[in-house]
Image (spheres, grey):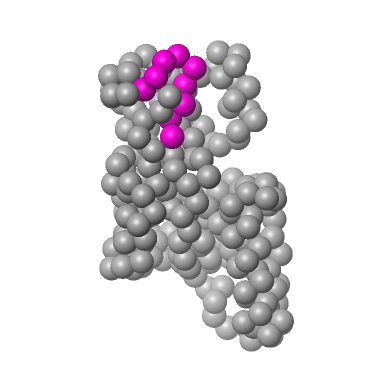
Amino acid sequence: MRLKKLMLPAAISIASLALSGNVLAQTWKMAVGDAAGGTQYELATKFAELIEEKSGGDTTVDIFPNGQLGSEEDTVNNASMGLLDLSILAINNITPFSPTVGVMTLPYVIQNAEDAKKLTQGEIGDQMTQNTIRDAGVRILGWSYSGCRRLTNSERPIEKPEDIEGLVIRVPKNEIMIAAYQPGGQPEPLGLDRDFHCSSARRGGWTGHSLHHH
């Protein structure tokens, strides 16, 4: 029971000043929202491995999974203030700080991984990177393509827009994603916590969820 699935890229962001200056041995802190074993965590592990290899061991990366360093939006703020070096986060959580990146969250713009790569690896991706430096004070170092966004619900199959009429749908805190379920549905923005929102739905808090599935 879902609307057509949408590819959503994730971004590795870094405080824009973190790449400059210090040539001495150093350790960077990386925030990861996923738990160990998730796709974000696997990406972080590989990134840390390559940084240590390419720097000859002079730079290492400490990974903090499971949202230990705050929500993904918190990590953008902390990176911009120099309190955090690296964060792996979903595009929708950097959009509030750099609105043009929100094009990645528009419904049906990205249908598959190839679409996502074309958008992020070319001129448009370069422009979004520059905009994010300007608007958010962080730099997007790279893009990953970890899964699709799907609508699930406990009421009925969703085959056309009218089928969401009356559904109370948990959505991320993103204006574009909220608007995508209006009119008809009743979107309720909330940060992602799978255990919490799934148990809430069983208690009748929501009848549907817009989720990112790996």
> Quick check: 44 above or below 196?
below
Q: Is 150 or 83 nearer to us in this picture?
A: 150
Would residue 154 appear left or right of 29 to someone viewing this image?
Answer: left
Indicate the position of residue 117 as horizontal and vertical percent values: 36, 60
Magenta residues span: 150-158
User: Residue at left 53%, top 45%?
Assistant: 214
Indicate the position of residue 96 as horizontal and vertical percent values: 41, 47
Is there any visible trace of residue 49 in the rendered image?
yes
> Quick check: 114 above or below 153?
below
> Quick check: 179 above or below 53?
above
Q: Is residue 87 magenta?
A: no
Quadrant showing the N terminus: top left
Indicate the position of residue 201 as horizontal and vertical percent values: 56, 19
User: Residue at left 28%, top 46%?
Assistant: 109
Indicate the position of residue 138 as horizontal and vertical percent values: 47, 64
Total marks shown come to 0
Q: Is 151 or 137 nearer to us in this picture?
A: 151
Would residue 163 appear left or right of 31 to someone viewing this image?
Answer: left
Q: Quadrant of residue 58?
A: bottom right
Q: Is residue 155 magenta?
A: yes
Is there any visible trace of residue 69 in the rendered image?
no
User: Residue at left 29%, top 63%?
Assistant: 124
Q: Quadrant of residue 162?
A: top left
User: Residue at left 65%, top 69%?
Assistant: 48
Would residue 148 appear left or right of 15 to someone viewing this image?
Answer: left
Q: Is 60 or 145 nearer to us in this picture?
A: 145
